[in-house]
C-alpha cells in the first residue's frame, strides 16, 4: 500500500531530527565533504562535480572563495609549481627578449630592454612582450599548469581557449596604472557569466612599493567598468612572493601602483577566453572598397574594430576606449 503524504512527511521530519542530532552526517548528500554522494544528484552536471573535486584535490577551495567574494585570487607558490620552474620561466623569457631585441633584461636595471614597437605608458619604464607561447615549451607548460587549469575550468569552462601569452616588465616611475576591467571590448552591463580570465604569474616579488597590481575588492559584482578616477581610494595592493599566480575575471577592477623600488617587476600573463566563433572570415577578406561603400557601423560588423590578432608588435590599445570614458565606436 502506498504511504500517505502525511506518513512520508512524518518520516522526513523524523530523519531530519535524527540527522540534526547526529554529529557525523557524512552519508548525507547535503554534506559538502561527501562529494561522491553528489554524483547521484541529477541537477548537478557531471562536469561541475569533476571540476569541484579537482579544485578540492589541488587544495584550491580558499582561492575559489577569494574569487567569489573579492573578485580575484592569489594562489601561493607552493600550490602552483616548484621554485626551479619559476626560475626557468624567467630565464626563458629573458632569452626571448634577448633574441628579439639584442639585450638581455637585467633584474637590477631600472629599464627593460625595449624596441620602437613596444608601448610605453606613463607609469615609468614599461615594456610589453607579446606572442610568447610558441617561443619555448616552458610557456606552454605554464599555460597547462594544473592549478591554473582547475581555476579556468571553474571560471570559463573546459573548452576555454588561450587568447594571449605576454610579459610585462616595469621599472621605477611615478604614475599608477589606471583602474580598469579587462572586459575592455564588452559593453556594460557585464554578464554574470565571466568570458575572460587573466592569469598572472609573478616572476618577481610583488608589493605596493615594488609596483604591484591592485584590485577593488568586490568590484566584479558591479557589472561595469570603473568611471574615470572612480574608486581609487579603494585599491588594495597584492603582496605576493615570486611564484604566486594571481587570477581574476574580466569584470574585476584593477590597476597597479607605481614602482618605487629600484629594479624590474616581471610577470607572465596568460589571458583565457570562452570560445566565441566568428564563422566566415569577413574580417580578413572584406575589401576597402566594400567598407567605403557602407556606413561606419558596417566596419564594426566586419570585425575591423577588434583589438586582436597581434604578434610581436603587440595589441593596438588605442582601439579600446572604454576605460577612457567613451564608447570606442563613437
Ligand atoms: O600587471 C599589472 O600591473 C596589471 C596589468 C593589467 O592590467 C593586466 O594584466 O590586465
Ligand atoms: Fe588589466
Image: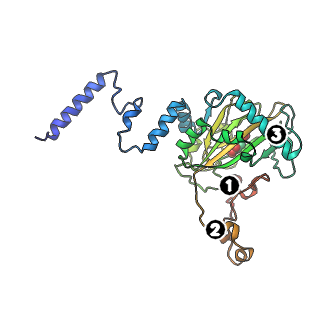
Does the image show residue 98?
A: yes
Find disc 3 in the rendering and name its residue: 95
Which of the 4 quarters of the picture holds residue 166?
A: top right
Q: Nearer the viewer, mark 2 or mark 1?
A: 2
Find disc 1 in the rendering and name its residue: 322
Residue at the (56%, 52%) spot, across then down = 190
109 relative position to 150: left or right? right
Q: Quadrant location of the C terminus? A: bottom right
**Label 3 to label 2: alpha-carbon separation:** 40 Å
Where 169 sits versus 187, above or below? above
Judging from the image, what secondary structure is the residue with disc 2 in? helix
**Mark 2 CB lies closer than 8 A to ligand 2:** no
Judging from the image, what secondary structure is the residue with disc 3 in? helix
**Label 3 to label 1: alpha-carbon separation:** 35 Å
Residue 301 disc label: 2
155 relative position to 10: left or right? right
Residue 96 disc label: none
**Label 2 to label 1: alpha-carbon separation:** 18 Å
Q: Quadrant of ligand 1?
A: top right
Residues packed near mark 1 inside 10 Å, few (<14), some (14 to 19) or many (20 plus): many
Nearer the N terminus, badge 2 or badge 1? Answer: 2
Residue 26 x %, y %: 36, 26
Amino acid at each position: 500500500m502506498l504511504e500517505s503524504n502525511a506518513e512520508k512527511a512524518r518520516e522526513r521530519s523524523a530523519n531530519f531530527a535524527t540527522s540534526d542530532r547526529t554529529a557525523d552526517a557524512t552519508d548525507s548528500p547535503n554534506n559538502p565533504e561527501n562529494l561522491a554522494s553528489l554524483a547521484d544528484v541529477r541537477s548537478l552536471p557531471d562536469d561541475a562535480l569533476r571540476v569541484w573535486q579537482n579544485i578540492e584535490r589541488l587544495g584550491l577551495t580558499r582561492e575559489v572563495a577569494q574569487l567569489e567574494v573579492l573578485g580575484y585570487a592569489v594562489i601561493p607558490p607552493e600550490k602552483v609549481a616548484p621554485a626551479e620552474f619559476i626560475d626557468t620561466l624567467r630565464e626563458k623569457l629573458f632569452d626571448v627578449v634577448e633574441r628579439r631585441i639584442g639585450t638581455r633584461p637585467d633584474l637590477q636595471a631600472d629599464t627593460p630592454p625595449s624596441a620602437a614597437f613596444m608601448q610605453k605608458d606613463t607609469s615609468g619604464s614599461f615594456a610589453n612582450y607579446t606572442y610568447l607561447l610558441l617561443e619555448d615549451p616552458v610557456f606552454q607548460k605554464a599555460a597547462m599548469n594544473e592549478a591554473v587549469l582547475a581555476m579556468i575550468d571553474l571560471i570559463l569552462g573546459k573548452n576555454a581557449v588561450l587568447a594571449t601569452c605576454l610579459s610585462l616588465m616595469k621599472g621605477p616611475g611615478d604614475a599608477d596604472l589606471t583602474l580598469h576591467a579587462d572586459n575592455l571590448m564588452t559593453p556594460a552591463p557585464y554578464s554574470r557569466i565571466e568570458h575572460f580570465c587573466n592569469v598572472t604569474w609573478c616572476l618577481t616579488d610583488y608589493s605596493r612599493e615594488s609596483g604591484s597590481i591592485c584590485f577593488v575588492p568586490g568590484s566584479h559584482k558591479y557589472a561595469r567598468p570603473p568611471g574615470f578616477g572612480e574608486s581609487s581610494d579603494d585599491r588594495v595592493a597584492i603582496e605576493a612572493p615570486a611564484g604566486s599566480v594571481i587570477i581574476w575575471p574580466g569584470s574585476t577592477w584593477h590597476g597597479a601602483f607605481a614602482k618605487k623600488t629600484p629594479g624590474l617587476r616581471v610577470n607572465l600573463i596568460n589571458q583565457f577566453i570562452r570560445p566565441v566563433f566568428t564563422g566566415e572570415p569577413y574580417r580578413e577578406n572584406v575589401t576597402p572598397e566594400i567598407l567605403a561603400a557602407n556606413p561606419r557601423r558596417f566596419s564594426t560588423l566586419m570585425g575591423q574594430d577588434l583589438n586582436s590578432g597581434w604578434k610581436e608588435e603587440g595589441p593596438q590599445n588605442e582601439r579600446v576606449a572604454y576605460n577612457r570614458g567613451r564608447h570606442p565606436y563613437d
